[in-house]
Image (tube, helix red, strand yellow):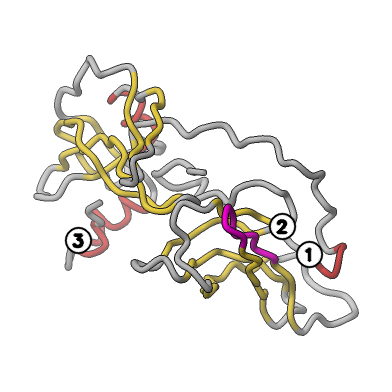
Amino acid sequence: MPDPRDRRGSKADERAFETKNFVLGGDLPIKAPALGKVDWGNGKDLSRPLMEAKKAYQSLALNRSAGPHLTVTGARLGTTTIVTSRGNAAVPAWLFTLESYDTPLKRVAVTPSKLPEPPIGQARQGTAGGLRSIARLAGTAADGRSVTVRATHGSCDDSPVVKALETKESVVLHASLKGAESGPCSAEMIEQNLRVELSQPLGDRLLLDALTGRPVPFGDPKGTAPSWT
């Protein structure tokens, strides 16, 4: 994905990118296959409904204001690689061409699967030894021996702590807090990246949140890529 913030001297483009201010200056494909394949490269794949180019563009252009904007001149269907709780996967993506940029802006074109129902009931956050939820998966190391997650803590805590319980089929992440203080605290929540080392490569094992019993979602809910499980 090209990031206009990497383009020196273009404060207007940087602002347009951050505020998701796009305008359409060309034609988008009208037709697309009904299904797209999510491929983990291990002989296992998944077919999911494919998003039309127009809908994908509309999910990018969330702020069509009079301020600085980026111009989308066209799109074609290609592929991109995303991190999932089952490892890296190649997925169909709409590649949007931007005026004055050589590299296309990628938008995942397949819709994510619905999260499965957990086999356990969700615990109340902060109970069971201070158990907390994990915001999302931020990445997986190339060798699969560590994962990076976004975890939260409050202003009266030193930092979150995430530990892994590994089995042959899954990796359960247990998040808690370190250095919690008593007394009044502000309601702000602070997110930070935490790297969790694994004894074996993640492979196709499911990455689960101990609090919810569900797979750890990937991606920023407010970003340009959907959450993958």
Principal secondary structure, stretch drawn in magenta? strand
In-front residue for pair 74/39? 39
Which label was assigned to residue 131?
1
- Residue drawn 33% across and 17% down? 34
Residue 47, relative to residue 147: is it above or below? above
Q: In this view, does 63 lie to the left or right of 147?
A: left
Where is residue 204? Give x, y as percent. 46, 51
Residue 195, relative to residue 2: is it above or below? below
Which label was assigned to residue 122?
none
In-front residue for pair 1/164? 164
Where is residue 100? Give x, y as percent. 10, 48
Quadrant of the image occupied by residue 114: top right
Within 10 Å of disc 3 (Cα), the crowding (few <14, some 14-19, many 20+) is few
What amino acid type should be assigned to the residue bearing mark 2?
Ala
Secondary element at tag 1? loop
Which label was assigned to residue 210?
2
Q: Do the residues labelled 2 and 1 touch (CB within 8 Å)?
A: yes
Q: Name the residue under label 3.
A: 10
Residue 172, relative to residue 69: is it above or below? below
What amino acid type should be assigned to the residue bearing mark 1?
Leu
Q: What stretch is highlighted in magenta?
A: 167-174
Q: Is label 2 or label 1 in front?
A: 2
Q: Does the magenta stretch include residue 168?
A: yes
Q: Is label 1 or label 3 in front?
A: 1
Quadrant of the image occupied by residue 97: top left
Q: How far apart are marks 3 and 2 (CA)?
A: 44 Å
Q: Does the magenta stretch include residue 134?
A: no
> Is residue 95 in view from this perspective?
yes
